[in-house]
Amino acid sequence: MVIDPPYLIFLGDVPDALAAKTGLGIVDWRPEWCIGQLRLEGCRADAKIPDLSIEAAVAQGVKTMVVGSVNAGGVLPPHWINSIVAALDAGLNVATGLHTRLASIPEIAAAAARSGAQLHDVRFSDQRFDTGKGTKRPGLRCLTVGTDCSVGKKYTALALEREMRSRGMDADFRATGQTGVFISGRGAAIDAVAADFISGAVEWIAPAADPNHWDLVEGQGSLFHPSFAGVSLGLLHGAQADAFVVCHEPTRTTMRGVEHGLPSIRDVIDLTRACGSLTNPAIACTGIAVNTQELGEAEARTLLQELAREYAVPATDPIRFGVNELVDRLQSVYGK
């Protein structure tokens, strides 16, 4: 699948920034590909790039409109169809990471046929995956895990890749969700993989490698989330992680989309070790990544210091304070 940049990021009328995390993630990590955003009335997310009409985007050389939203169930709201049809009729390709296949909607399929534009369903892969085997494979892997959904697992893995490469380390971000695939140009959205093949898909995403090579595997969901724990567990087994970083958002009281309370960081560490030891008995927690955007700087630094003391691993906000300490720990423990 080749998705031609530059992009127009379509945010629809999403209610908050978390609902636009696909589009915002692409803008954060591939800003050079993002010419503008298209928002409908009532949209409460802002990627901080120019607002453009479809006609203006075409005039500025945009090739693909990316539907940059996520929602429970990955469905395409019916009132967005007109915007997608208009983009296709203007000659733009359209890409989405939703569970709804674009061509399954008659109006969209007809518009693509009229214009010859391409439809890209990033959540679906033509790759055939085997069942996971759990056989030890060479290379080193660090998995990001979470106390909840949307707490920074992707951003942490990308920040680790950037810092490791800046140090001359052999490291690759491994995408397991639609936003990560848009950003990296490779990977697979494992929440669209049949359950029996999730761990096998992750073995394919992060295959055997040089013993000094690090794969930074993007985590999904949470082992404690009643909606998504099955995906998280299959990912953990397939990643065969040597190290894991726990990602956390400290201001939440319930998990996203459900009434269940958040687990503690200790709960996540213990359960990740217990489950992850099935495919790597040596799995270890090497850091904590906290999304502190709702905290003042002094409050954030105090919290991180307390977590580092309590859990005896580095704690940081990867975006606010960087990941130097997390990479230092990986190098000191694994010598790579």
Image (cartoon, rainbow, N blue to C red):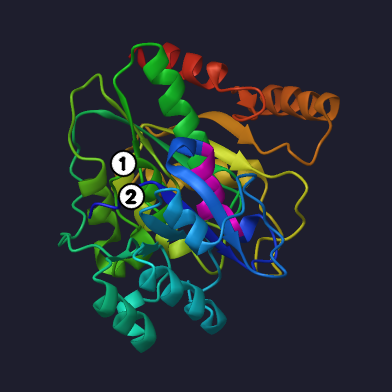
Residue type at numbered disc 1 = Gln
Q: Is residue 313 visible?
A: yes
Judging by the rendered image, the residue that carries numbered circle 2 is 237
Single out the residue that lies furthest toward the front. 59
**Where are the magenta residues, as a range?**
20-28
Reading the image, the residue beneath label 1 is 240
Residue 24 painted magenta:
yes
Q: Write down the quadrant of residue 174 in the picture.
A: top left
Q: Foreground residue, 154 or 20? A: 20
| Cα separation between marks 2 and 1 | 6 Å
Q: Position of residue 312 (x, y in %)?
A: 62, 22
The location of residue 148, given as percent across then percent down, is: 60, 54
Estimate how packed mark 1 is, as few (under 14), some (14 to 19) or many (20 or more) residues with alpha carbons within 10 Å.
many
Q: Main secondary structure of the magenta part?
A: helix
Asked if residue 285 can be seen in this view, the reply is no
Q: Nearer the viewer, residue 282 or 173?
A: 173
Placement of 229 over or under 235, stated as above or below:
below
Residue sitting at x 21%, y 55%? 132
Q: Is residue 293 magenta?
A: no
327 shown above or below 257: above
For mark 2, give the secondary structure: helix
